[in-house]
């Protein structure tokens, strides 16, 4: 397998949906392996290696029931006092037409204080092409709203043909993680679980 984020993400875009639809054990095993590899590659990224409190966790479903819109959460073991949590997320839509990189907060209300409070940290993200949006479009068949579509405070879309090389993606990832750091430092936080060794 490639050790590049862009190659691994592209392989997921190519292979995940056929695996989910076919429910073929071999294809599902390959899809899981790709997500494990993406988590491994992300964990080696300099932006995460400097942040021992952040760990990539894939969320793709259980057993042979792969979820429609898989994710990799960069789980932060800090807890934001005003909302509970802020997480950077790599989100795949159902149609696998690209990926989102963004930030979610622990609120299901677009006008909540926690959502509004985070917007003050958006400046550098906006400069890197992130949108300040509460809901993203995961291109779900039938137009149903997935839980994963709401609760966003910042997101950036990369279409299948426009997934950047790792150096450019790392700049966006670093900007997202820095925005989370600023929010945690400014608003106050407590540790909710043990940091990575």
Image (cartoon, rainbow, N blue to C red):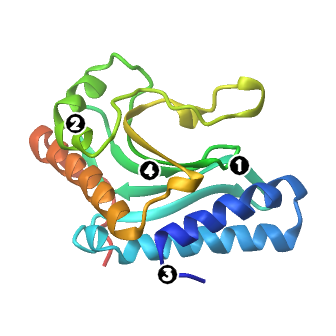
Distance from label 4 to label 1 (Cα)? 16 Å
- The answer to whether residue 115 is seen in the rendering is yes
Residue 126 pos. (x, y %): 25, 38
At 47% from the left edge and 76% from the top edge, which residue is drawn? 4
- SS for tag 2? loop
Counting residues from the start of the chain, the first of labels 4 and 2 encountered is 4
**Residue tagged by mark 2?**
122
At 55% from the left edge and 71% from the top edge, which residue is drawn? 7
Counting residues from the start of the chain, the first of labels 2 and 1 encountered is 1
Viewer-proximal residue, 71 or 141? Answer: 141
Please name which of the two marks, 4 or 2, marks the residue nearer to the observer.
2
Which mark identifies residue 67? 1
Please name which of the two marks, 2 or 1, marks the residue nearer to the observer.
2
Q: Is residue 40 above or below residue 126?
A: below
Q: Is residue 26 left or right of residue 67?
A: right
Counting residues from the start of the chain, the first of labels 4 and 1 encountered is 1
Distance from label 2 to label 1 (Cα)? 30 Å
Counting residues from the start of the chain, the first of labels 2 and 3 encountered is 3
Distance from label 2 to label 3 (Cα)? 30 Å
Distance from label 4 to label 3 (Cα)? 19 Å
- SS for tag 3? loop
């Amino acid at each position: 397998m490639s050790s590049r984020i862009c190659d691994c993400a592209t392989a997921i875009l190519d292979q995940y949906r056929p695996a989910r639809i076919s429910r073929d054990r071999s294809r599902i095993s390959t899809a899981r392996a790709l997500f494990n590899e993406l988590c491994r590659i992300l964990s080696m990224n300099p932006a995460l290696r400097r942040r021992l409190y952040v760990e990539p966790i894939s969320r793709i479903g259980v057993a042979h029931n792969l979820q429609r819109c898989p994710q990799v959460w960069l789980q932060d073991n800090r807890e934001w006092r005003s909302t509970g949590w802020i997480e950077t997320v790599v989100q795949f839509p159902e149609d696998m037409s690209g990926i989102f990189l963004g930030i979610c907060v622990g609120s299901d209300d677009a006008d909540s204080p926690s959502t509004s409070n985070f917007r003050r940290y958006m400046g550098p993200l906006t400069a890197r092409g992130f949108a300040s949006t509460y809901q993203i479009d995961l291109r779900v068949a039938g137009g149903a709203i997935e839980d994963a579509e709401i609760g966003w405070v910042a997101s950036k879309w990369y279409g299948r043909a426009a997934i950047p090389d790792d150096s450019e993606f790392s700049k966006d990832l670093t900007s997202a993680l820095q925005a989370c750091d600023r929010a945690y430092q400014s608003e106050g936080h407590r540790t909710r679980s043990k940091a990575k060794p």
